[in-house]
Amino acid sequence: MKEKGRALIAQNRKARHNYAIMDTYEAGVALLGTEVKSLRLGRASLVDAFATVDDGEMWLRGLHIAEYTLGSWTNHDPRRVRKLLMHREEIERLIGKIREGGLTLVPLSLYFNDGKVKCELALARGKKDYDKRTDLAKRDADREIQRAYGRAAKGRAREMR
């Protein structure tokens, strides 16, 4: 039976905090057999991962996929460089955007899509410390507003009884 749907393996939560996301892309990942088995157990980390373009090919660096516990001498190196699979036109477009504006490629998540491992990449610009503080303050203010609305709605519900 063939797998259907999307199953999340790992997510880079800090990426949205540290970077301003401009655009997102989906890329396939070229993997070894023991890497796929380890990913099916959910043993991956995107913490220090980033993507580079070398000689017209895209590479995912810093992705940690733990060794497969039942693997033998065929086991993989946990932090090896892995090739990303995208269409040539998309890669060329990304190269142009990266060169022109000081942008970087950051992996946001790793997931299975119909049985194949995919990586969601973001074209992103690094945030300054003051941008991060502003975002945190805005998020806290929005959360407080939602709480106030919730308290007001509960208060009105009591009055209607």
Image: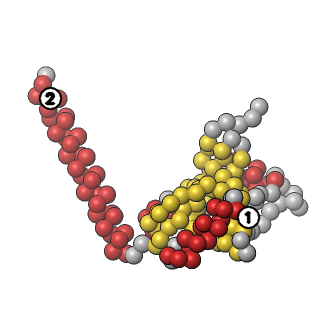
Q: Position of residue 95 (x, y in %)?
A: 61, 71
The count of marks equals 2
Query: Where the N terminus falls, by quadrant?
Result: top right
Name the quadrant of the C terminus. Answer: top left
Q: Residue at x 50, y 76 (%)?
A: 101
What secondary structure is marked by label 2? helix
Question: Which quadrant of the structure image shows residue 94?
Answer: bottom right
- Crowd around label 1: few <14 · some 14–19 · many ≥20 (10 Å): some
Q: Quadrant of residue 67?
A: bottom right
Q: Find the residue positioned furthest to the top.
A: 161
Q: Residue at x 33, y 63 (%)?
A: 136
1 or 2: tag closer to the N-terminus:
1
SS at mark 1 in the image: strand
50 left or right of 137? right
C-alpha gap between disc 1 and disc 2:
59 Å
Of badges 1 and 2, the one in the foreground is 1
Neighbourhood count class around disc 2 (C-alpha, 10 Å): few under 14, some 14–19, many 20 upward: few
Could you tell me which residue is drawn at 70 percent across and 62 percent down?
Answer: 88
Q: Which mark is residue 73?
A: none
Horizontal arrangement in the rendering, residue 108 relative to residue 55 (left or right): left
Residue at 65% x, 56% y is 27
Given residues 60 and 37, the one toward you in this image is: 60
The answer to whether mark 1 and mark 2 are in CB contact below 8 A is: no
Image quadrant of residue 137? Answer: bottom left
The percent coordinates of residue 106 (x first, y second) are: 56, 66
**Amino acid type assigned to the residue bearing label 1 in the image:** Lys
The residue identified by callout 2 is 158
| Protein image colouring | secondary structure
Q: Amino acid at mark 2?
A: Arg
Q: Nearer the viewer, residue 140 or 73?
A: 140
Q: Is residue 79 visible?
A: no
Circle 1 residue: 83
